[in-house]
Image: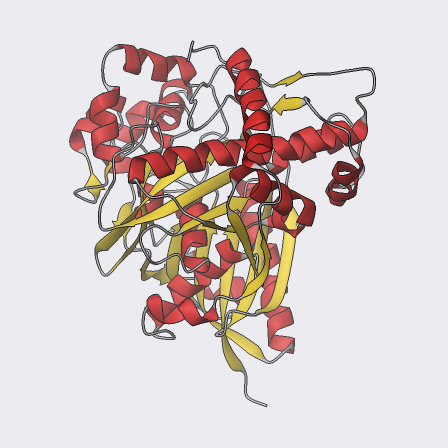
Amino acid sequence: MADNNGILAIDQGTTSSRAIVFDLEGHIVATAQEEFSQHYPHSGWVEHEPQDLIDTTLDTSRRALKAAKAAGVHACTIGITNQRETTIVWDQRTGEPVHNAIVWQDRRTAERCAALKAAGHEAMVAERTGLLLDPYFAATKIAWILDNVRGARERARKGELAFGTVDTWLLWRLTGGRSHATDATNASRTLLFNIHRQAWDDDLLSLFDIPAAILPEVLDSADDFGTTDPELFGSALPVEGIAGDQHAAVVGQCCFRPGMIKSTYGTGCFALMNTGDTAVPSQNRMLTTTAYRINGQPTYALEGAIFIAGAAIQWLRDELGIIAHASQSEGLANDAEAEGLYMVPAFTGLGAPWWDPNARGAIFGLTRNTGVAEFVHAALDSVCLQTGDLLEAMADDSQTKQATLRVDGGMVANNWLLQRLADLTGLDVERPKVIETTALGAAYLAGLQHGLYQSLESLESQWSLDDRFKPAISHQAREHIVEGWHDAVRRTLTTGR
């Protein structure tokens, strides 16, 4: 039997690397996943070993390709999607990183961001990049590495070092150092990329004191990124799609029309609203970003970022040890009596729309009856309530009120969570049959470049509904819960908002 064509999607995330082979209809043929270590050198610091990222990527890719081949499917192209903003700097000649990867959650550059903001730079940065001055983004992480690794800044000026977000690091290693490139979505998360001109910005490079010589080439999200070293997978495979994880999920959820929203629930939560060819400036501290770029034409989105979503359940499991498995959360939340209990999971600061890097987590409303089930309920509620804050801000910025939210990511297998999400946002919540939409979006982009698909819009018919959750509580009940949440958030803020 002849092999059918398939696509390998590499999904390099914050806590694990996953490889999935899809057939051309978007069905999963084979998958492999592997976790890796998180490193916390100081309070608010988060790092990864760059070698762990490539090792787990190679291992999972080989396993998925082997399983797909056994099922009669041969991957003919590769798409990469990745944890965004995580920053790596390495030696151009040896490929050796000069420092651990600084993860998107890391807060070590909060003072640098505050100083730049106090000096009046945020308006210019926001106008050109669509972003805010926050440690979340890559620019101040790059500068920290150059300033804190002996000799790094001088080597960077000489063109001896390379910078990349995780997609660029993987691409460099997969191609044997032949390709130093990224796509427009990942570039737009650095604070160095002008989203209107779709190019690196000299004024921003000067502001953050970053030499242009270390930057990768910026290509479309569907483009020719290079071919893999034949020794890695037994034959050379083209890499033809790259997008940051949340942008790839927009593609995987087929949110191709302005006004459509997707929200992904993994370590963090990220909601994006397609705004078409207009980069809508936010009045509510949302982010304006490149959703994807095809044939040189950017499609934009409004984005709200929540730093801690699934990570709150991981905290209950790993640090407190009060649950053994994340899958227990659904049953426990259903059994809880958690009226008035709020968890504000600001373990690494608060994201949109609050943007307080110095806020720290807190729990309000504890009583003698508070137990494991109530903690789980409050953790899941925090995910829903933070989502509601994002959606309200987006609706105000875009002057559109949506009735439907498409969701994906590992957490959305939890039916209780999705019903609660519908209740606390007032929107219909739609879960697709394929919830690995981040990987699926990377596969679609690679397939488009490889000629397997005619256009992104032609893929809309492949999106398929698994379940829809409708709000089941009154507006008054929802408002009462939300008011309590906002009171809890205000008590954690350090910025006076």
Tell me which residue sits at (59%, 27%) in the image.
481
Q: Nearer the viewer, residue 334 or 263?
A: 334
Q: Is residue 134 visible?
A: yes
In the image, what residue occupies the spot 17% across and 31% down? Answer: 202
In front of the other: 238 or 198: 198
> In the rendered image, which quarter is residue 79 located in?
bottom left
At x 42%, y 64%, the residue is 444
The reply to whether residue 173 is visible in this rendering is no
The quadrant of the rendering that contains the C terminus is top left
Residue at point 52% right, 21% down? Answer: 486
Q: Is residue 235 above or below residue 146?
A: below
- Is 394 situated above or below 444? above
Indicate whether 56 appears above or below 433: above
- Image coloring type: secondary structure
Name the spot of residue 203 as percent of width and height, x first: 17, 27
In-image side of 30 versus 153 (left or right): right
The quarter holding residue 156 reads top left
Please state the horizontal and vertical placement of residue 298, each as a whole percent of the image.
24, 52
Total numbered badges shown on the rendered structure: 0
- Find residue 303 and report its image quarter: top left
- The location of residue 412, given as percent across then percent down, is 61, 49
